[in-house]
Image (cartoon, grey):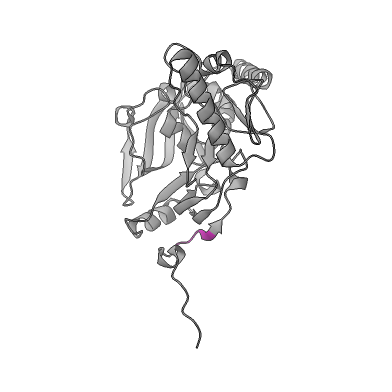
């Protein structure tokens, strides 16, 4: 007699055109290169496929959406439920007049370069954001004095039931490094406003942003974006430095000596090392300055 096979989450999921992967490794999909697997990883073929999935998914299945993993810490025991990876099918860019519409899986860098090609200014700052449009919308990402809210026109998202929503700036509820959109809504695209400008000037500004990043931030190492949000009126890195945390290490994790609001996986770190280091930084800053730093890096999964 052949023993019965245990039913897994994969067995219960809707039929889709894209691909499912059970116990999918996530470490190679995030910049820290740490973390456990997804119970199931889903790569939708297109928006229609994603909508079909949502409309037919059980209400009790946990959902998590990831982009390029630039500002993400996946905990070591992995992520329960379905992790949705928005890849190339969500990476299209269209430009009409002064408006740039980009899929949620498009990198911010690609949006900046498309604006440059169209001689549109105002989006140069996206050259300095190492993520995707979907994440930028969720966090109102910003750099070098400009935020997504400054150029935002509209966005499209699916709710947990697969219903489509077109969102205005007021509906987004942007504030510093956040928006008010429900956590289980999934952005599929956004439209940004540009202003006609001189291509050489736009390129020079983008080049300057890149030079500044190279000079002030750790590059080509296993790191994430900014670890903590800036408290009002002061830079997080300054508080971290004043608390004596520059170069601080836990296991294989280190506070960057080049920019101490960045954590680095020196090679052998696990996600627990990185999170423990971040919490130790928070403790020391609270002790020295009386300020509680708020995580900017998103942490997902089980410890």
Residue 196 location, x and y as percent? 50, 19
Q: Residue at x 60, y 43 (%)?
A: 34
Q: Nearer the viewer, residue 48 or 301?
A: 301
The reply to whether the magenta stretch includes residue 20 is yes
Position of 289 compared to 223: left or right? left
Above-or-below relation of 293 to 301: above
Q: Single out the residue that lies furthest toward the front.
A: 287
Position of 254 compared to 279: left or right? right
Can residue 131 be seen in this snapshot? no
Above-or-below relation of 188 to 168: below
Q: Residue at x 43, y 24 (%)?
A: 151
Can residue 166 be seen in this snapshot? yes
Residue 23 location, x and y as percent? 54, 58
Q: Quadrant of residue 126?
A: top right
Q: Single out the residue that lies furthest toward the bottom.
A: 1
Residue 121 location, x and y as percent? 52, 20
Residue 260 location, x and y as percent? 60, 21
Q: Nearer the viewer, residue 269 or 221?
A: 269
The reply to whether the magenta stretch includes residue 116 is no
- Count of all numbered marks drawn on residues in the image: 0
Q: Nearer the viewer, residue 247 or 23?
A: 247
Above-or-below relation of 143 to 65: above
Q: Single out the residue that lies furthest toward the top.
A: 233
Give the magenta range.
16-22
Q: Residue at x 30, y 31 (%)?
A: 171
Above-or-below relation of 11 to 25: below
């Amino acid at each position: 007699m052949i023993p019965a096979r245990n039913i897994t989450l994969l067995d219960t999921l809707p039929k889709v055109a894209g691909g499912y992967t059970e116990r999918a490794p996530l470490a190679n999909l995030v910049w820290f290169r740490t973390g456990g697997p997804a119970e199931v990883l889903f790569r939708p073929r297109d928006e229609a496929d994603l909508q079909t999935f949502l409309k037919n998914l059980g209400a009790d299945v946990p959902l998590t959406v990831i982009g390029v993993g630039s500002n993400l810490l996946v905990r070591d025991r992995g992520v329960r439920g379905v992790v949705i990876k928005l890849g190339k099918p969500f990476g299209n860019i269209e430009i009409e007049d002064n408006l740039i519409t980009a899929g949620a899986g498009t990198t911010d860098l690609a949006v900046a370069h498309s604006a440059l090609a169209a001689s549109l200014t105002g989006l140069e700052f996206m050259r300095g954001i190492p993520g995707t449009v979907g994440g930028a919308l969720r966090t109102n990402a910003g750099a070098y004095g400009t935020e997504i809210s400054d150029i935002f026109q509209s966005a499209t998202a699916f709710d947990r039931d697969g219903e489509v929503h077109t969102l205005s700036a007021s509906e987004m509820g942007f504030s510093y490094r956040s928006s008010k959109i429900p956590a289980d809504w999934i952005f599929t695209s956004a439209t940004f406003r540009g202003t006609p400008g001189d291509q050489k000037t736009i390129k020079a500004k983008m080049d300057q942003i890149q030079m500044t990043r190279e000079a002030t931030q750790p590059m080509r190492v296993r790191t994430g974006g900014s670890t903590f949000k800036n408290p009002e009126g002061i830079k997080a890195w300054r508080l971290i430095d004043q608390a004596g945390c520059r170069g601080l290490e836990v296991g294989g994790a280190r506070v960057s000596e080049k920019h101490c609001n960045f954590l680095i996986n020196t090679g052998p770190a696990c996600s627990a090392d990185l999170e423990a280091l971040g919490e130790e930084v928070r403790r020391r800053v609270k002790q020295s300055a009386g300020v509680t730093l708020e995580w900017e890096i998103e942490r997902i999964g089980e410890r």
